Amino acid sequence: MPHLRYITSGESHGRAMAVIIEGVPSGLEISPSDIDSELMRRQGGYGRGGRMRIESDTVQILSGIRLGRTIGSPITLLVENRDWANWEEVMAVEPQKGQPHPVTRPRPGHADLAGAMKYNTHDIRDVLERSSARETVSRVAAGAVAKRFLSEFDIRVVSYVTEIGGVGSRISNLVSQGSEKRIMGLFKKAERSRVRCPDKEAERAMIRRIDQARTDGDTLGGVFEVVVLGVPAGLGSYAQWDRRLNARLAHAVMGIQAIKGVEIGLGFEMAGRCGSEVMDEIYYRQRTGRFYRKTNNAGGIEGGMSNGMPIVVRAAMKPIPTLRNPLSSVDIVTKRSFRAVYERSDICAVPSASVIGEAVVALVIADAFLEKFGGDSMEEVRRNYKGYIRQISRF
């Protein structure tokens, strides 16, 4: 059972999105602004659609925090959907006199058709409201709590975009060469970029690519990297498959809507190279009494455990399937062919997805951290952590 558990709830055009987080120790200082800043980052990025002009996400903390500190009980976070005012009848809880017109035309690339078949409904509205990427606002809110917890132990979770629509960045792979200082420098540049890419030349090309896709009535996907800095060796385990840290990270990142591939470290590139080229050699510095590596092709994880190097997770996001230039589909009631209808959508959401990636990675790392150093209060966790760090420093 996870030490840090969370469950999300809510529909895209419903009253609100919510998340309940269980397992956060008592005594963690946290404020709504810690969460709101992450929600704001999720809404940014060049290529976003009209929904982002309607919503201005802010959190309401309903439980688990008192006088600015966690109290050890489940934390409930709620983010209202401002667009709810336009959908009250369509998304009403009680039956309506004039039932809303059902959605019967599935969009290629969405959960629409498979979801309607699975849940035995002929109104696709039941499916698309929950399968929508709007759900990720809940995970970003939960991830903000995890980030705040990890920051108490100088663990930072950052991200940047390396590719959009086939336009790649020169900074596409840091695992072999990136020091923590350089990675933080790139992250700061990414935070100032409209596409969250620290490479200025690539940023300009990505924006032109997005503009062209908008003109063509098309959409774009891309690639982003999430890097975790300051993680001690020993999180995760080789003892069981489901305790391996890389498996847990891949599970979480693949759970983000539209993500179709995940790599740790060099990932697939390792398959085409010799072992002598990709294994990270181990050295020992007598002056500090520490082991170290000059490369990080493993992406900070060996044998399912963190090895003390930065953890690098790379994810590939498919193009958004809602297109202005529609594709062919079939009505689930009439069985007639049609051209899929367009609903308000983004052209590119890769920059936003990178922020969501940070959130889910932070939640996994926080869970693994509590698994290793667990306690009911922050004081207890700190004591356990400090004892372990002393232990491995003498190894």
Image (cartoon, rainbow, N blue to C red):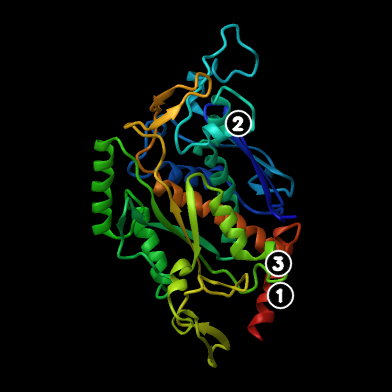
Q: Position of residue 223 (x, y in %)?
A: 40, 55
The amino acid on which the numbered mark 2 sits, given as a three-letter code, is Met
Say which of marks 3 and 2 sits in front: 2
88 and 337: which one is in front?
Answer: 337
The local crowd at label 3, few if under 14, some if 14 to 19, many if 20 or more residues have their Cα within 10 Å, is: some
115 and 94: which one is in front?
Answer: 115
- Total marks placed: 3
In the shown orientation, is residue 32 left or right of residue 28? left
Question: The residue tagged with tag 2: helix, strand or loop?
Answer: helix
Q: Quadrant of residue 67?
A: top right
Residue visible at 62% across and 52% down in the picture: 29
Q: Position of residue 259 (x, y in %)?
A: 48, 49
Question: The residue tagged with tag 1: helix, strand or loop?
Answer: helix
Give the alpha-carbon distance from disc 1 to disc 3, as whole Å.
Answer: 12 Å
Q: Are marks 3 and 2 in contact (CB under 8 Å)?
A: no
Say which of marks 1 and 3 sits in front: 3
Seen as rendered, the residue at the extreme top is: 97
Say which of marks 2 and 1 sits in front: 2
The amino acid on which the numbered mark 3 sits, given as a three-letter code, is Lys
Residue 328 is tagged as none
- First in sequence: mark 2 vs mark 1: 2
Give the alpha-carbon distance from disc 2 to disc 1, as whole Å.
Answer: 53 Å
Name above or below for residue 359 compared with residue 101. below
Question: The residue tagged with tag 3: helix, strand or loop?
Answer: helix
Residue 117 is tagged as 2
Residue visible at 56% across and 42% down in the picture: 32
Q: Which residue carries the number 1 mark?
A: 387
Q: Which residue carries the number 3 mark?
A: 372
Name above or below for residue 280 compared with residue 66. below
Name above or below for residue 334 compared with residue 227. above
Q: Position of residue 122 (x, y in %)?
A: 58, 22
The local crowd at label 2, few if under 14, some if 14 to 19, many if 20 or more residues have their Cα within 10 Å, is: few
